[in-house]
């Protein structure tokens, strides 16, 4: 992953070319229907979560000493009167330095929210969002912090998360079943993020003009296989294996708002998460994993409900496990 233009902790590129349906959003919970389209399979997957806006209210904003204004559950909703609400203003210096991937400050330009604005898609997977005093409002409510924090775009910052899975196998090549559930065990490729030390799905930001399908392949090859550092022959082999898997019918398991600690009142993360499954184990499974520049470690990890993962990635895996009738 290119450190300047694709760093998860700071750089955010926005473009969305995958057509989908908007989703209803609440502040205390969320139930979304992920509808696979285009190059994905036609399977519809429902994913529900009771914790849809929790990490976005973490007391200390990541990468800083900035403390958010406290937001109790009952005051999250913008429609709830909260006259004492006084969010802290914070935009990271890396964003204020005007890198190519970030918007200018409001007032110095006039973004067209809820629409395609030049090469930047400012539409949300959640449907139309409010704009107040020229600034977009987080569709899931108050976060205790205004500005953009580490995020480059005002409003939605679009990402794509490739969930690459395989069946866990023993030394004879047989699928391993969990001793309690008696269901086959799935494994997924996970990276350990350098910015926070948490394990996560190896996703990344959608570049302007880039299709979601391209982002999914690029991010996986760069973060999990370190393709940028590979020799030409190695890179060719990697891309061939990746193309074979990613050109298959993927299972879109989620599309919408991400409960991310980087979110603010005026900027937030959204993603499309797609599962690509190496059923036979002779595709991507045979490639050696190597962490890219944004990952400290990379590994095949057993899918299990006890995992502690970044943002709401655990919910993505739960959907995958249940759809594939695997252990959870």
Image: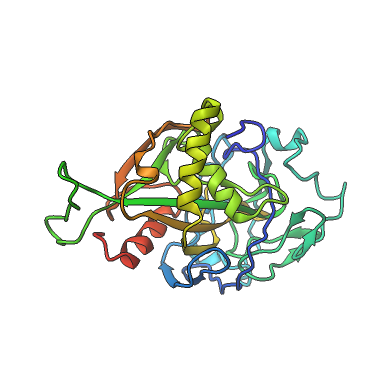
Q: Is 88 or 55 nearer to us in this picture?
A: 55
In the image, residue 88 above or below residue 255: above
**Which quadrant of the rendered structure holds the C terminus?**
bottom left
Residue 162 visible in image: no
Q: Position of residue 185 (x, y in %)?
A: 23, 54
Residue drawn at the location 53% of the way across and 35% of the way down: 236
Q: Quadrant of residue 139?
A: bottom right
Residue 237 visible in image: yes
Q: Position of residue 65 (x, y in %)?
A: 56, 34
In the image, residue 64 above or below residue 283: above
Q: Position of residue 242 (x, y in %)?
A: 48, 45
Which residue ends up furthest to the left in the rendered image? 179
Q: Is 193 or 248 nearer to us in this picture?
A: 248
**Which quadrant of the rendered structure holds the N terminus?**
top right
Q: Quadrant of residue 321?
A: bottom left
Q: Is 279 or 183 nearer to us in this picture?
A: 279
Q: Is residue 233 left or right of residue 117?
A: left
Q: Position of residue 192 (x, y in %)?
A: 41, 36
Q: How is the image coloured?
A: rainbow
Q: Is residue 224 left or right of residue 138?
A: left
Please tell me how many numbered marks the rendered image carries. 0
């Amino acid at each position: 992953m290119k450190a300047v233009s694709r760093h998860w902790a700071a750089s955010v590129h926005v473009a969305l070319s995958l057509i989908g349906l908007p989703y209803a959003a609440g502040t205390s919970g969320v139930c979304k229907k992920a509808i696979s389209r285009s190059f994905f399979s036609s399977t519809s997957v429902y994913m529900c979560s009771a914790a849809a806006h929790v990490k976005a209210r973490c007391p200390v904003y990541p990468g800083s000493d900035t403390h958010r204004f406290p937001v109790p559950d009952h005051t999250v909703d913008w429609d709830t009167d909260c006259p004492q609400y006084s969010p802290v203003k914070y935009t990271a210096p890396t964003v204020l330095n005007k890198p190519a991937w970030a918007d200018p400050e409001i007032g110095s330009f006039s973004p067209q929210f809820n629409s395609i604005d030049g090469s930047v898609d400012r539409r949300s997977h959640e449907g139309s969002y409010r704009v107040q005093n020229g600034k977009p409002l987080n569709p899931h409510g108050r976060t205790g912090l205004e500005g953009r924090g580490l995020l480059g775009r005002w409003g939605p910052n679009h990402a794509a998360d490739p969930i690459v899975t395989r069946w866990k196998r023993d030394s004879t090549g047989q699928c391993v079943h969990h001793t309690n559930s008696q269901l086959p065990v799935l494994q997924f490729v996970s990276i350990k993020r350098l910015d926070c030390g948490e394990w996560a799905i190896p996703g990344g930001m959608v570049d302007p003009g880039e299709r979601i399908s391209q982002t999914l392949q690029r991010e996986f090859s760069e973060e999990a296989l370190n393709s940028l550092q590979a020799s030409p022959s190695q890179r060719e082999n990697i891309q061939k294996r990746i193309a074979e898997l990613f050109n298959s019918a993927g299972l879109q398991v989620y599309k919408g708002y991400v409960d991310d600690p980087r979110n603010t009142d005026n900027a937030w993360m959204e993603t499309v998460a797609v599962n690509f499954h190496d059923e036979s184990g002779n595709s991507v499974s045979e490639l050696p994993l190597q962490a890219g520049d944004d990952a400290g470690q990379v590994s095949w990890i057993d899918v299990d409900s006890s995992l502690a993962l970044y943002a709401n990635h655990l919910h993505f895996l739960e959907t995958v496990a249940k759809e594939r009738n695997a252990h959870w």
